[in-house]
Amino acid sequence: MRFAHARLDHDVAVANSRTLFEAAPAAGIQRIVHVSITHPSLDSPYPYFRGKAQVEQALDEIGVSHAIVRPAILFGGNGVLINNIAWLLRHLPVFAIGGRGDYRVRGIHVDDLARLCVSLGGRTDTVTVDAVGPQSLTFRELVHAVRAAVGSRAIVVPVSPALLTALSSALGLALRDRLLTREEYQAMAAGLADSDAPPTGGIVLTDWLAEHSAEFGRRYASELDRHFRGQQH
């Protein structure tokens, strides 16, 4: 889960993951492939990254053969990030980015991630792998690539982190969603969405954007609708 909402928070997510891991040996599970995040840390100031590290720790303690896969951002399929950047660029005259936008992101296509997980599932060694594609872009480069792909004329402007958070909150209220939290921006600006690991996927993000430009950003993808609304807690 990207952020805490209602009665669900990262502590709940960690506890639920631990319950699943503890049930696995009793069910005869011999190997687990777990999807985490790049740069998890038990000492992270960001609850999301700290929670991911706690889940990895819980998996290590179970003693089941496992692989940990660490993607930064995903694209393809019904992903939220690229789609909603495109949606905003299609509908707004101005698109704000925090600071200079020179912090890097290194995405992996969902199909590449799936192939990696299947491959690691067939192994027997315990291993941790950064799941990253062949291309690392600055966030500004990513936004401009999406802008070009969808034919947007929106002006991309740098703003202060405080103003970006305020704008994201205001848009979130209008869309009944949460676009970008302060912690998510801070983590990205700190370089946690990048990796210097060798690529584990072959699909180039900018090539995919050019090939699928007519498909994404047509409808807004609500994080709250997908993961929280209508659930019984």
Image: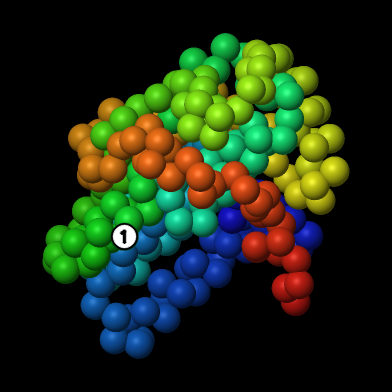
Q: Quadrant of residue 228?
A: bottom right
Q: Which residue is painted at 25% across and 45% down in the image?
A: 201
Give the quarter of the figure containing the C terminus: bottom right
What residue is drawn where x is 69% and y is 54%? 222
Q: What colour scheme does the image use? A: rainbow
Q: Residues within 10 Å of mark 1 (few under 14, many from 20)?
A: few
What amino acid does circle 1 point to?
Ala
Q: Residue at 79% x, 28% y: name it.
A: 167
Above or below 158: residue 108: below
Q: Position of residue 147 (x, y in %)?
A: 55, 28
Question: In the depicted view, which residue is nearer to us: 44 or 163?
Answer: 163
- Residue 24: name its quadrant: bottom left
- Say if 14 sits above or below 210 in the image: below
Image position of 83 (left or right of 193): right
Picture quadrant where residue 81 is located: top right
Q: Residue furthest bottom?
A: 27
- Please state, as top left, top right, bottom left or bottom right, where the N terminus lies in the image: bottom right
Q: Is residue 51 visible?
A: yes
Left or right for 35, reference 42 = left
According to the image, label 1 marks what residue? 114
